[in-house]
Image (cartoon, coloured by chain):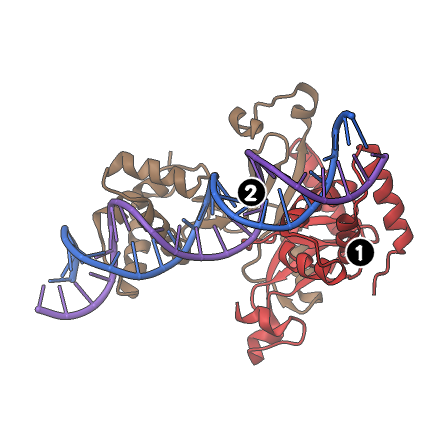
Chain colours: A brown, B red, C blue, D purple
Amino acid sequence: MAQIPRESVREILHAHLAGKGLRKTSQRDAIIEAAFGTNEHYTAEELLVMARGIDRSVSRATVYRTLPILVESGLLRELDLGGDTKIYDPNFLEHPTHNHLVCVDCKKIIEFEDPNMELLENCISRRLGFSPTNKRLTIEARCDEFQQRGTCKKGNPEAAKA
Amino acid sequence: MAQIPRESVREILHAHLAGKGLRKTSQRDAIIEAAFGTNEHYTAEELLVMARGIDRSVSRATVYRTLPILVESGLLRELDLGGDTKIYDPNFLEHPTHNHLVCVDCKKIIEFEDPNMELLENCISRRLGFSPTNKRLTIEARCDEFQQRGTCKKGNPEAAKA
DNA sequence: ATTTCTGCAAACGATTTGCACAGGG
DNA sequence: CCCTGTGCAAATCGTTTGCAGAAAT
């Protein structure tokens, strides 16, 4: 499933760890494996479950302590999409400029890229006296299909109930 | 300070309360007064302090219970700008389509309107199969001035430390 | 009178942290 | 060996909620 070659991830991560005097541990390996073994978004808790599937000894605390490291490394992106849980997005390397559309109805997160949006963000930021570095953009919208049928195949059905 | 005539706010709010069988109470009045007596953004906790300045008897729970009512009424907007606290924006009536730029450095929240952004949001949403209703958009950026001087007059200085 | 509101304090849920031990360099 | 990483459980912090009394209709 993962589109990023595992070696690249490992390389970049090892470089990052080494550069910071951080150590390679079996738990971190399991977490990394889990974190980049999918293209789906996930929460810290979901990552914990996935990582435990690889190495039973991974603890919640270690997941929470490792996530910021992965984010710093530039391989993982942390999303604040308005819920009370942070969401993590492993597709950052391939699509560094993508934005997110969150469906209010079905909770589905859709990634999109749009050069016009890129351009417009830059213009607006500059006009206001800001550098467009490190920007995030999220659109919240309503799902047409969900509006009509009360359900939709885009989103995960359980999320819709929440 | 408030640009919205207080009567309009009261009228709309009373209509909203009446329509839902909700009661007018002194605590709610104080909260409303505080909520629309400024153009600044605020957190629930900050609103509590402001409301208590008007009516000492206002409790934290009542503020938290009243905020969703104000948001539903359409007069107050709830913003999720990525921190762990929700932010409330009383300027929604005057500028219904405005978006937000949050400075990573000085934490300042800047409101802006841009017809091109409007248009683009609509196009993108539609293209993806969503109705552009109820959308929110936030740009996160770095403050030029802050980058150069380590401080900036745009933002509130204390927020920058956080 | 009836029903909604309120304050208080306890409950909550995601995340963080102190501690003593385990394990990489 | 030394210092970082780990699991556990307790602590945080914003927000929510159960309850019994207070107030609005």
Name which residue lies at 66% across and 24% down: A145
Q: CA distance from mark 1 to mark 2?
A: 28 Å
Disc number at residue B141?
Answer: none
Residue hosting label 2: A83
- Looking at the rendering, in which quadrant would you find the N terminus of chain B? bottom right
Give percent across and percent down for residue A96.
50, 51
Question: What subunit carries mark 2?
Answer: A
The quadrant in which residue D8 appears is top left
Query: Counting other residues with Cα less than 10 Å from the Cα at mark 2, is it few (<14), some (14-19), or many (20 or more)?
Result: few
**Which residue occupies the foreground of this view, C24 or A86?**
A86
Task: Name the mark nearer the viewer: 1 or 2.
Answer: 1
Name which residue lies at 65% across and 25% down: A146
- Does residue C20 appear to the left or right of B129 in the view shown? left
Label 2: which secondary element = loop
Residue hosting label 1: B33
Question: What subunit carries mark 1?
Answer: B
Name which residue lies at 65% across and 70% down: B155
